[in-house]
Image: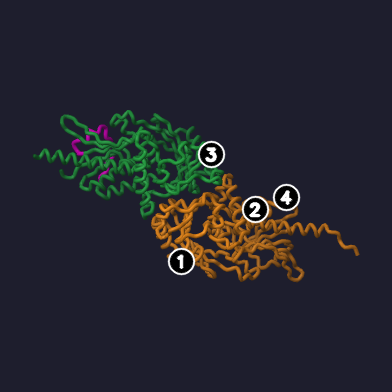
Chain colours: A green, B orange
Amino acid sequence: MEAPKIAVVGAGVIGLSTALCIVETCPSSSVTVLSDQFSPNTTSDVAAGMLIPHTYPGTPIHLQKQWFKETFTYLFAISNSTEASEAGIHLVSGWQVFKSTPKEELPFWSDVVLGFRPMSEAELQKFPQHRFGQAFTTLKCDCPPYLLWLEKRLKATGVQMYNRKVADLWELHREYDIVVNCTGIGAHQLVGDKKLFPVRGQVLQVHAPWVKNFIRDGDGLTYIYPGIHRVTLGGTREKESWSLSPDPGTTKDIFDRCCSLEASLQEAQDIKVKVGLRPSRQCVRLQREILSQGGVKLPVVHNYGHGAGGFSVHRGTAKEAARLVRECIGALQGSSSRAKL
Amino acid sequence: MRVAVIGAGVIGLSSALCIHEQFQGLVPSLELELYADHFTPHTTSDGAAGLWQPYLSDGGNLQETLWNKETFDYLLGHLHSPAAKEMGLFLLSGYNLFTEPVPDPSWKNIVLGFRNLTPKELELFPGYSYGWFNTALMLEGRNYLPWLTNRLTQRGVKFFHKKVESFQELFSQGVDVVINCTGMRSGELQPDPELQPGRGQIIKVVAPWVKHFIITHDMKSGIYQSPYVIPGSEFTVLGGIYQHGNWSEENSAQDHRTVWERCCRLLPALQTAKIVGEWTGLRPTRPQVRLERESVRQGNLQGEVIHNYGHGGFGITIHWGCAMAAARLFGSILQENRKVASSPQPRL
């Protein structure tokens, strides 16, 4: 078949990075990105983009580590290049602190990030309510810059992007040969995945340029992540909440919790409140499916359900999705050549 | 008791504050005045990036290491106070890079989390094979000096915008003790061949994605002659110039190129950074800090001088330890005065 036509649905970090991987590994294909939201209005835009993995209960650890490592290596190279500031990728050091010593003192990703080690007594003195901590250096992907950079790279390779609400993947079967579903929380309705559920996160983005280190409570609820222009203060993890409206009580609670970790945040200015719905699942849905109606088939590759860990594994899962797309292309070419006999 | 501090850089202002805090309550007659021809933002301290970091080797000068430690601990204690932001005080982590293994510095246990760099971290810095990571403090002069000035003003310390030509000038006005914090131009008040300029030139850029200090070292050339990048709260300082004996305060195009090219090679992303300023300053360099008392007499004019100058490129790093030492010297002057005042007069 001539250039297979591939539609990637979704333009958050997963959709855009998957589209880019497909372009890189299937150069003869024609890739189009379809989404009803683009940066700065995606879930990814709310995320701080810190490379600190979330653990998926349903995915083997070695695979999660592989995805994280691939993502870290990819971004590490960009952070070290002239494109770093445009792509919004930068190194940031800091501390993860625990009120009680965690069961697992060495997380699976400790040898992927840089300089991971337990905090010294002197460092812990800065956190009187916490008894244990880890210091390390990792990467941060600021959004919108990272998404805009991905969009720019895609456009440079000829990828078209359209603002379009896809109500049903099947509607794409006439225009496209393969569909890649990177719709994040949208998959709940789009493909009726009941295993996918939102975990609502509210964050504050503030002006506090003297904060240069990240601080994260090991419970994952309170964190301070310095970005290029703003510091993200978080957060919440509200399972099954679909509300995208900021809650003022939550805002105050987040601010207070973050100030207790970093007192100087009292002087933070220009507080913006954002809400995102983490597209959560026991494991990332990263698999092929064939939709068929009346003898017509539409191969689909799903790549959604990254929950709190989208940025940390995006490149790794995008590469796997691209591999699945190549398999689909191979299968289509096989069946079309059979059809010619 | 009239005390005049000469100099309004970090050394002068902090010495004044330290002395006033310690003795104003004990000596109700204490009148403290501060004289300077340059105030913030026009002092040498204003141009410094503000990173707390001593030189690599203290040259066996344990006293200076102790003053550095006193300063770090003092600032660390202020980190959680509401004043920290106004003071321009915040934590900053970063890298010191070398082309060969070097001994650990005297300050390794003063800073937080000091450790060697891992091989993967060194991949970030081609050409450097060894290094350190630690968390230190930033104290930005452009915030700290106004903060010190406000504290002094609140305490009733009087400021005089004037160039003092001699110690005698002040003694003749009735000043009892002079605190000489005149930095680079101390030689104009009293010749000191040991005090030499260590000329530095820096470029200020907007590069808010840089969250670490990066200081490279060329052991053959000497301190600050190798590129460094220090992110502040509003802009990032690029530097790497140290010219001993050069008194020029003009920016040099050649030095600009040296700093720019070397820093961009170190951090390629800097090529996209916007340049917003350039500055030259003279580090008041001396084999060791001059911090001592001197009785100065000319004709029938006499007074005590406490010298506190020659802090080179580590003024901010050492300032509070020196201010405390200057205050101790002042205390000893007070003590002697009390003894003289209370000792029995000879009867004729």
| Mark 1 residue type | Asp
Measured in 3D between alpha carbons, the distance from the residue under mark 4 to the one under mark 3, in whole angstroms, is 39 Å
Q: Residues within 10 Å of mark 2 (few under 14, many from 20)?
A: many
Task: State the residue in front, B304 or A91.
Answer: A91
Report the span colored magenta: A159-177
| Mark 2 residue type | Leu
| Same-subunit check for callouts 1 and 3 | no
Q: Is residue B293 above or below residue A321?
A: below
Label 3 chain ID: A
Viewer-side label of 4, 3: 3
Task: State the residue in front, B150 or B22.
Answer: B22
| Mark 3 residue type | His
Q: Secondary structure at mark 2?
A: helix
Viewer-side label of 2, 4: 4
Viewer-side label of 2, 1: 1
Q: Position of residue A220 (x, y in %)?
A: 45, 37
Image side of residue B28 versus residue B287, left or right: right
Asked if residue A161 lies in the magenta stretch, the reply is yes
Instruction: Give the number of the disc on residue B25.
Output: 4
Give the residue at mark 1.
B255
Measured in 3D between alpha carbons, the distance from the residue under mark 2 to the one under mark 1, in whole angstroms, is 37 Å
**Sooner in the amino-acid sequence: mark 2 or mark 4:** 4
| Mark 4 residue type | Gly
